[in-house]
Amino acid sequence: MLDVGGDTGALIIYTGRDQHGREIEISRVDQAGAVRTHSAVRERIVRDGVFHSAVYPDLTSGVYTVWWDEETPAGTISVNGGSIAEFVWPTSPSRST
């Protein structure tokens, strides 16, 4: 269960099984040089089966970069207060600059 509301949201990054145990980092786009937050990809067992994801609770509203590695973005995602944003892990890093 995630506690979201006001200016606080959450992010779930869905990955494949091959990412199990990987630490995925995110950071706010508008805070250059900000410390990155990370979460490990875990196996989640639900009624309909199994999926793998990294969960980031308690995020302040804003646009976040999801990092493929230390230097390369995988993409960006908007997190809004009171809701849960969802990001699907890409098969290759973002080509945008």
Image (spheres, helix red, strand yellow):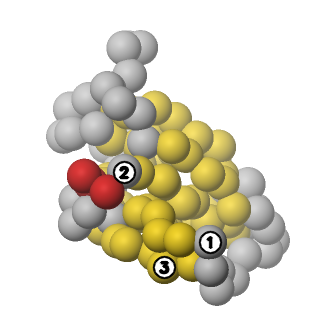
Residue 25 spot, x, y in % from top left: 32, 53
Residue 84 spot, x, y in % from top left: 69, 62
Specify the amino acid type for callout 2.
Answer: Gly
- Picture residue at 53% right of the left edge, 71% below the top: 49
Specify the amino acid type for callout 3.
Answer: Ile
Residue 97 spot, x, y in % from top left: 38, 14
Q: Quadrant of residue 39?
A: bottom left
- Picture residue at 26% right of the left edge, 29% below the top: 72
Give the residue pinned by disc 2.
16
Q: CA distance from mark 2 to mark 3?
A: 14 Å
In primary-sequence order, the first of circles 2 and 3 is 2
* Kind of element beneath mark 2: loop
Give the residue pinned by disc 1.
48
Give the residue pinned by disc 3.
45
Specify the amino acid type for callout 1.
Answer: Asp
Q: Nearer the viewer, mark 1 or mark 2?
A: 1
